[in-house]
């Protein structure tokens, strides 16, 4: 029990790094010992098994307990959150077209590239209205998303608070199951890296490095160009003093904790120091931790397009727009656990007819680079919660002709 306690309390980042290094070394020294790669296969299969039901329960629970009548401020900030998710996905599309990256995947010959756009739309519609049990068993994420929304709305209208709490508890149970699986990520990563290195050599790290760099560049572009520009459109003020405060006070802690939920108390304290309305940030900060997921939208889009590039699938402008919409919606439903956005990659891949066997290999690659990717992703997501909460608050103060204490107590420094 002491060993289990020490294992779960130790840094997951360091454990994944150790798994990556050990797997790489073993892949070089003993490439014929294929049994070492077996934990990687188990890890991927475990993720494949839990991901569909996790998405279904989380979305249904969130919709059933969503609050209504939250006012114009809340509507504005929700629109901003969704807008930034979509724009972040577009940034990822542009970056992937300017700098296409390839990664190592196996068994890709069974995947057939999609036909015309109308054919894909037709298939998407049929997939959406498939049997919900079949959708879960076959990991049809479009169908899962549709039925979870319908059931969530029905629960919202009919179910008692007790029933909603039970659904919420079930969602927490599945989230905890994912957390348990994630505890085995270092061993799974070791097996996955061993298999990749033993099959492809050290060049695999150059491929992963390019993929990781592509995602980080997209995140930095959104953090330092896109988000400030959106804030400027609302406030007509230099957004960078506010941005730098949010990065310094929120992004650094989020980078190392890799959890937007864990960063909520820090963000609320920062909102107080910025002089924001408690009635606004007490809702917008927890809400932002759920749906303000620019980094997740970037990760989902990049990983999907990289998969398309590997399979020779040409992504036209209509396909790219559909992907951005799907990534925006998928990012809003990302589980609040380490690597939560990676579990939604199969849903985005499904619009291009990519099988779950292939897409879950991409998820596994995502866990290899998650040491860096997830830290940058969470830092962007969490710091922008405060950034856009402040932008919304200041916008309405300017609109209502109120005096603006821009930057709160930080203005005195």
Image (cartoon, rainbow, N blue to C red):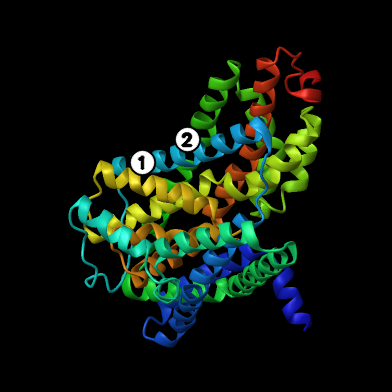
x then y, percent, for residue 146: 45, 59
Rendered-image quadrant of the N terminus: bottom right
Decide which of tag 1 and tag 2 comes sooner along the chain: 1
x then y, percent, for residue 169: 70, 68
x then y, percent, for residue 106: 30, 72
Rendered-image quadrant of the C terminus: top right
Q: Is residue 126 above or below residue 392?
A: below
Q: Quadrant of residue 242?
A: top right
Q: Is residue 6 left or right of residue 22?
A: right
**Residue at the image point whose x is 18% and y is 53% from the top:** 116
Label 1 to label 2, Cα distance in Å? 10 Å
Let me know if residue 119 appears in the view.
yes
Q: Secondary structure at mark 2?
A: helix
Q: Secondary structure at mark 1?
A: helix
Q: Is residue 54 above or below residue 114?
A: below
**Residue at the image point whose x is 34% and y is 47% from the top:** 322
- What mark, if any, has residue 265 been given in the picture? none
**Residue under circle 2?**
221
Q: Residue furthest front?
A: 158
Quick one: 190 or 293, which is closer to the camera? Answer: 293
Q: Is residue 400 above or below residue 225?
A: above
Label 1 close to label 2 by CB (< 8 Å): yes
Q: Residues within 10 Å of mark 2 (few under 14, many from 20)?
A: some
- What mark, if any, has residue 95 been given in the picture? 1
């Amino acid at each position: 029990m002491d060993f289990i306690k020490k294992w779960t309390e130790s840094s997951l980042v360091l454990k994944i790094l150790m798994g990556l290094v050990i797997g790489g070394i073993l892949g070089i020294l003993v490439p014929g010992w294929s049994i070492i790669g077996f934990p990687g296969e188990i890890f991927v299969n475990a993720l494949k098994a839990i991901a569909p039901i996790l998405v279904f329960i989380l979305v249904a629970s969130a919709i059933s307990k969503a609050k209504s009548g939250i006012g114009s401020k809340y509507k504005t900030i929700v629109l901003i959150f969704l807008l930034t998710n979509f724009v972040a996905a577009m940034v990822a599309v542009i970056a992937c077209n300017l700098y296409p990256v390839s990664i190592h995947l196996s068994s890709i010959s069974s995947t057939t590239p999609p036909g015309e756009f109308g054919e894909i739309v037709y298939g998407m519609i049929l997939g959406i209205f498939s049997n919900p049990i079949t959708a879960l068993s076959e990991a049809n994420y479009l169908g899962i998303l549709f039925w979870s929304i319908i059931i969530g709305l029905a629960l919202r209208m009919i179910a008692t608070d007790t029933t909603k709490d039970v659904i919420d508890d079930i969602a927490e149970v599945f989230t905890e199951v994912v957390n348990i699986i994630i505890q085995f990520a270092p061993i799974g990563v070791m097996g996955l890296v061993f298999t990749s290195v033993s099959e492809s050599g050290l060049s695999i790290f150059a491929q992963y490095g390019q993929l990781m760099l592509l995602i980080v560049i997209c995140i930095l572009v959104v953090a330092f160009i896109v988000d400030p520009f959106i804030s400027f459109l609302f406030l007509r003020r230099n957004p960078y003093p506010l941005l730098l405060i949010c990065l310094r006070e929120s992004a650094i802690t989020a980078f190392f904790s890799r959890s937007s939920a864990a960063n909520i108390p820090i963000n609320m304290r920062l909102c107080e120091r910025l002089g924001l309305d408690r009635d606004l940030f007490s809702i917008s900060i927890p809400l932002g931790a759920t749906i303000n997921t620019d980094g997740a939208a970037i990760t989902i889009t990049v990983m999907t397009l990289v998969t398309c590039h590997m399979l020779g699938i040409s992504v036209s402008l209509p396909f790219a727009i559909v992907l951005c919409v799907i990534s925006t919606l998928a990012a809003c439903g990302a589980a609040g656990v380490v690597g939560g956005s990676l579990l939604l990659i199969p849903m985005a891949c499904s619009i291009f007819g990519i099988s779950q066997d292939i897409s879950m290999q991409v998820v596994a690659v995502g866990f290899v680079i998650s040491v860096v990717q997830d830290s940058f992703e969470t830092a962007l997501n969490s710091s922008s919660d405060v950034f856009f909460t402040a932008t919304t608050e200041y916008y309405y103060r300017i609109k209502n002709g109120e005096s603006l204490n821009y930057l709160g107590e930080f203005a005195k420094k």
